[in-house]
Amino acid sequence: MTDILSMTPDELTAFVRSIGEKDFRAKQLYQWMQKGAQLYEMTNLPASMREKLEKEAEYRLPKIEAKYVSKIDGTVKYLFSLIDGECVESVFMRYEHGNSLCVSSQAGCRMGCRFCASTLNGKTRDLTASEILGQVIMAQRDTGERVGGVVMMGIGEPLDNYDNAIRFLRLVSHPDGLNIGLRHISLSTCGLVDKIDRLSEENLPITLSISLHASDNETRSALMPVNNKYPLEKLLAACRRYFDKTGRRVSFEYTLIAGKNDSLPQADALAALLKSGMHAVCHVNLILLNEVAETGLSTVGRKNAEAFRDRLEKRGINATIRRRLGSDIDASCGQLRLRHAKANS
Ligand code: SAH
């Protein structure tokens, strides 16, 4: 079956031709799909064409399995189920400059980061481009509001599902489609160096976010097994190449974990690393750990985070503490999927 929602307008035109329909029908179909319409709702398409699509095309949108709305800030968390019953999460966030959606790229994750809920049961499968796009379409349809930005920071490692992630980026930013500006899209990775190099060649002006979480190899390898394959020297060199190639400032995520990576000497080491590796052309996003019971790791207090930030700033590194949205609805990713899987086992 042909997954029509994963197609670009040109590919869809070729497909529509192949089932004996006129080119302009592709445009109509494309517009409907971007709105999340069901086939029977596509009333300007002939019934005979809809029947052909029913038989020859696969067109499925994620289904809202559960939805939680934060009473504090209006953040909406979705648990979506996919065609085979796999579940993923998306988070709809409201900011002054517009709405943003955090999307998942895989069902589960095989990267094994010690602090992360998404990886506890490993990876089940990659999502298709249409399954990633479908999260954006459904969030827009459900909220009735425009999504102006996307962060690929949900469940999964986007660069471990490279082709589908790239296809998603091209689809979601397509001028005839949702038309979300690439400059309003961030992709977060645990640091797959070979894929970062490939990404730098794609001519996609997105923001690359690196999950760093440590400034020395010993600490980072203990938290993130991927560091054994791609240690800090290699990772920073790839980030520098990415910046040189694209001119896009790289952003680094650093989740503060009590007693592991939160000391002031570690802030000094982080500043030194980013100065030598990136000439300080970067931004550090400090994140307060979202505690996941299974990991036994604890968060630091707000005061410690501020001290860590001030230390980085003092050393010439731009840093902010990420605002926590949806704290009353368990909005960080992976926890909902995990609970859902447990409840159904
Ligand atoms: N696989 C990608 C994207 C998904 S994770 C990556 O590793 O970047 C998105 C961000 O949340 C990453 O920076 C990740 O390290 C961080 N994260 C994961 N679990 C967390 C937790 N329990 N508390 C705080 N941040 C967490």
Image (spheres, rainbow, N blue to C red):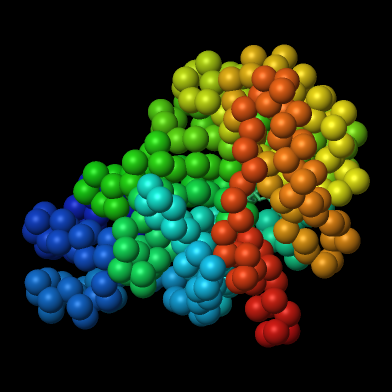
Q: Name the side, left or right, on which 21 lies relative to 215.
A: left
Label total for image: 0
Does 18 appear above or below 223? Answer: below
Q: What residue sits 68% from the left and 47% below the top?
A: 287
Residue sticking out furthest to the front: 303
Does the image show residue 344?
Answer: yes
Residue 68 pos. (x, y %): 53, 75
In which image quadrant can residue 141 be found? Answer: bottom left
Q: Name the side, left or right, on which 125 lies relative to 262.
A: left
Does 115 appear above or below 190? Answer: below
Q: What residue sits 85% from the left and 61% below the top?
A: 295
Q: What residue sits 81% from the left and 51% below the top?
A: 300
Of residues 206 and 304, which is closer to you in this image?
A: 304
Q: The C terminus appears in which quarter of the rendering?
A: bottom right
Residue 192 pos. (x, y %): 66, 36
Q: The N terminus appears in which quarter of the rendering?
A: bottom left
Residue 172 pos. (x, y %): 36, 49
Of residues 307 and 299, which is closer to you in this image?
A: 307
